[in-house]
């Protein structure tokens, strides 16, 4: 049965961000708990396409442990 606690439902409508090309451990835990998504910005994408692909895989893997599929967005004009 899906977790419908107020905390989990609130977490699922949030999209967060972080700096760098790898997923920080704290964010991996939030994704396992049901974080709605991650928005990637310039610091996440500057290492190139393969790095972004790897980061997206990390995000999906962390959320899969929690049984949740997050939204992955990019806000990158560069």
Image: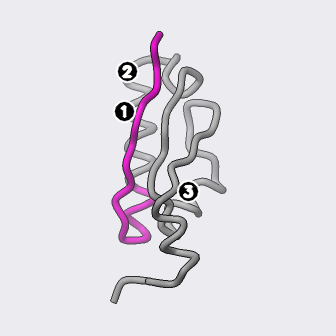
Residue 71: horizontal and vertical position, in percent? 37, 49
Which residue is depicted at the point 49% across and 23% down? 45
User: Which one is earlier in the sequence, the residue at label 1 or at label 3?
Assistant: 3
| Camera-nearest residue between 57 and 72 | 72
Q: Circle 1 — which element? A: helix
Quarter holding the N terminus is: bottom left
Residue 71 among those drawn in magenta: yes
Q: What residue is shown with label 3?
A: 28
Residue 24: horizontal and vertical position, in percent? 63, 47
Left or right: 68, with 19 as reference point: left
- Asked if marks 2 and 3 touch (Cβ < 8 Å), the reply is no
Q: Alpha-carbon distance for marks 1 and 2?
A: 6 Å
Q: Residue furthest bottom?
A: 1
User: Which one is earlier in the sequence, the residue at label 2 or at label 3?
Assistant: 3
Measured along the vertical axis of the image, is residue 18 above or below residue 34? above
Residue 46: horizontal and vertical position, in percent? 52, 17
Which residue is depicted at the point 38% across and 24% down? 50
Q: What residue is shown with label 1?
A: 53
Assess disc 1: are there few (<14), some (14-19) or many (≥20) residues with their C-alpha within 10 Å of its C-alpha.
few
- Asked if marks 1 and 2 touch (Cβ < 8 Å), the reply is yes
Q: Alpha-carbon distance for marks 2 and 3?
A: 21 Å
Q: Quadrant of residue 69?
A: bottom left
Left or right: 54, with 7 as reference point: left
Q: Circle 3 — which element? A: helix
Which residue is depicted at the point 58% across and 76% down? 7
Q: Magenta region: which residues?
A: 61-78
Q: Which mark is residue 25?
A: none
| Camera-nearest residue between 1 and 63 | 1
Q: Which mark is residue 49?
A: 2
Left or right: 56, with 9 as reference point: left
Assess disc 2: are there few (<14), some (14-19) or many (≥20) residues with their C-alpha within 10 Å of its C-alpha.
few
């Amino acid at each position: 049965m899906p977790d419908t606690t107020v905390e989990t439902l609130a977490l699922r409508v949030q999209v967060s961000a972080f700096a760098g090309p790898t997923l920080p451990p704290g964010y991996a835990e939030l994704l396992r708990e049901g974080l709605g998504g991650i928005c990637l910005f310039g610091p996440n994408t500057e290492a190139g396409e393969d790095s972004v692909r790897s980061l997206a895989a990390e995000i999906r893997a962390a959320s899969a442990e929690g049984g949740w599929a997050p939204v992955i967005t990019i806000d990158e004009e560069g």
